[in-house]
Image (cartoon, rainbow, N blue to C red):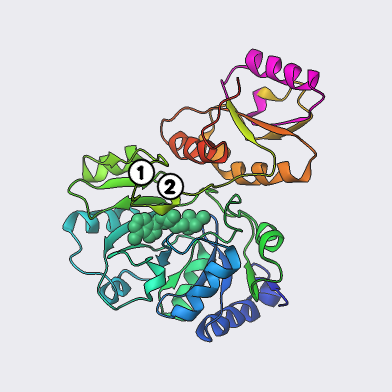
Amino acid sequence: MKTGMVNVDNLSTKEQGYTQAVDLLKSGEVVAFPTETVYGLGAVATDEAAVRKIFGAKGRPQDNPLIVHIGEVAELEAFTTNISSLAYVCIDAFWPGPLTLVLPLKEFSLAKNVTAGLDTVGVRIPEHPVALELLKRLKQPVAAPSANKSGKPSPTKAIHVWDDLNGKIPFIVDGGTTGIGLESTVLDFTTDIPTILRPGGVTKEMLEKVIGQVNESKFTDDVKAPRAPGMKYAHYAPNAPVYLIESSIEVVKNAVADIHKEHKKVALIASEQFGQTAADYFFSLGKENQLEDAAALLFDALRNCDGTDADIVLAPVFTKQDVGSAIMNRLEKAADGNYYE
Ligand code: AMP
Ligand code: MG
């Protein structure tokens, strides 16, 4: 399959880009498009055959549900029921935005493969102008996971989507670099106390200011029936193994020296203050303590490791406060929980 890519930030190709994307979606095809979190790979959420193509192109396990994207709150009614008043408070406060709400699914309203057979559905209104324009033109819910090959870091640039899915999907809407760079926060409203299933740009601290107590699931892999199947699978992994390491320049310098003694090459993914540690490759996550910048740069940095001959990737840990919680969640998955010893 030939993969088309059109830049919709360019006035001369904008109209063609949206028209082609909407036409393809309406005809049961998949289309990649930017959101404020990462690029998504979308299909009309009521079209089972179209949704099946998402799983096929990504190589995604069938029991991992997809997030449904809508352009207007009014569209919720078609496929959810019994939305609590607290959920509406969240909707008012954070939509459009990087917050996915897990709500009770209205029976027989969406294709079964969107929710992996669960009786709940994850849904959000994205804040990105391109995603919103697409959804408002289409006027149908779009199921869209991140537009990467399953297991790889999520795409924050159109070229990342191209690298992973060229030849496997018909079309990429290029809308530049995504803003936040990490996937949405997933908040489950089907538990007594709302529970964060996946940390993201909307932090626990931000949620609690608006709706009071919020629980956090442990994000472990040993949950037998994970509420968020994303917890269960390898994620965000470059080809070389990733190891977390103490956030100390001394400790990192010593580790680099040890790795060099074994005639191996090391890539370092870290904030700027780690720039002088003699690592063979250094991918900056921005200035020290600028968590939003680190979030935006993380997936590109992980992907850049694959363009090197590094044998090992080191990543100093971040604080788990605020967006640091989402950064560490992705890094722990990329490292499969391993620390450098
Ligand atoms: P992705 O967009 O590739 O990060 O994948 C979507 C993620 O959304 C899944 O891995 C789940 O963590 C979450 N999700 C989507 N729908 C549900 C649902 N009904 N219940 C729990 N989690 C969900
Ligand atoms: Mg994903």
- Where residue 73 appears, as percent x and y from the top left, is 31, 69
State the extent of the magenta-drawn residues as a range: 245-273
Q: Which label is found at residue 265?
A: none
Which three-letter amino acid code belongs to the residue tagged 1? Val
Q: Quadrant of the C terminus?
A: top right
- Where residue 335 appears, as percent x and y from the top left, is 57, 36
Q: Residue at x 29, y 73 (%)?
A: 79
- Mark 2 C-beta to ligand 1 under 8 Å: yes
Circle 2 residue: 231
**Residue 27 shows in this picture:** yes
Which three-letter amino acid code belongs to the residue tagged 2? Met
Asked whether the residues under the numbered discs 1 and 2 touch, taking CB atoms below 8 Å apart as contact, a structural biologist would say: yes
Circle 1 residue: 223
**Residue 98 shows in this picture:** no
* Residue at disc 2, secondary structure: helix
Few, some or many residues within 10 Å of mark 1 (<14, 14–19, 20+): few
- Where residue 269 appears, as percent x and y from the top left, is 65, 33
Is residue 1 shown left or right of residue 184? right
Is residue 121 shown left or right of residue 16? left
What distance separates the C-alpha of mark 1 from that of mark 2? 8 Å
